[in-house]
Image: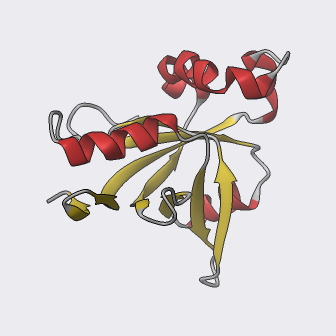
Amino acid sequence: MTGPATPALLTPGDDGDAAVARRLDREPIIWVTTVSADHRPHSVPVWFHWADPFVTIFSRPSTAKVRRLRGNPAVSLSLDSAAQGADIVLAEGDAGLVSLADVAPVVPEFERKYLPMLGEQPIGQWLETFSQPVVVTVRRLVAWRATPEGLDHRSLPR
């Protein structure tokens, strides 16, 4: 993963940013869209870990998304809409195919998040199948949500 030179996108203490962070921390699924060599988009739902500004996912090495990322690292990400479409989080970034050693610090947090869905399967066994880590460096976040004061819209970085 990229080091501390990559600044966080969300500002601690900002209520709107905190709402975005909560969604990114808690949601189980994020949709990742990659683009093929002939410019066709391909979207799939994946499990993920958020650590501002990084999204870590794990993939089977033979998937279309991994093949597409080898040719073009640009991705878009989106959470499912919430609050009848009034709570939206979208992101754009660049994905890198990395080694498991590169993301080892994330694995315990990922396991805690998805333990109920893993059932009896240990995380190590799951990682044998989903053995290709992908780290997305999020370059831009766009979010909006309904608040009592009206629509809160943010595009980050500001």
Q: Position of residue 107 (x, y in %)?
A: 57, 21
User: Colour scheme of this structure image?
Assistant: secondary structure
Instruction: Judge by depth and name the residue closer to the eye, 149 or 132.
Output: 149
Query: Which residue is rendered at x = 42% and y = 61% of the image?
Result: 88
Quarter of the figure with the C terminus: bottom left
Query: Which residue is rendered at x = 36% and y = 52% of the image?
Result: 138
Residue 11 seen in this snapshot = yes
Query: Which residue is rendered at x = 66% and y = 48% of the image?
Result: 46
**Quick one: which residue is furthest to the bottom in this view?**
38
Residue 53 seen in this snapshot = no
Task: Look at the picture and state if 120 lies above or below 152.
Answer: above
**Quick one: which residue is furthest to the front in this view?**
148
Q: Where is residue 73 in the image (x, y as percent from the top left)?
A: 50, 61
Give the image quarter of residue 115.
top right
Instruction: Judge by depth and name the residue closer to the eye, 8 or 83.
Output: 83
Task: Look at the picture and state if 42 lies above or below 66.
Answer: below
**Quick one: which residue is furthest to the right in this view?**
120
Quarter of the figure with the N terminus: top left
- 153 relative to 114 in the view: left or right: left
Number of on-image labels: 0
Query: Which residue is rendered at x = 17% and y = 40% of the image?
Result: 11
- 34 relative to 16 in the view: left or right: right
Q: Position of residue 91 (x, y in %)?
A: 40, 59
- 90 relative to 69 in the view: left or right: left
Give the image quarter of residue 108.
top right
Task: Look at the picture and state if 129 lies above or below 152.
Answer: above
Task: Look at the picture and state if 102 lies above or below 32.
Answer: above
Q: Position of residue 119 (x, y in %)?
A: 82, 21
Instruction: Judge by depth and name the residue closer to the eye, 83 or 56.
Output: 83
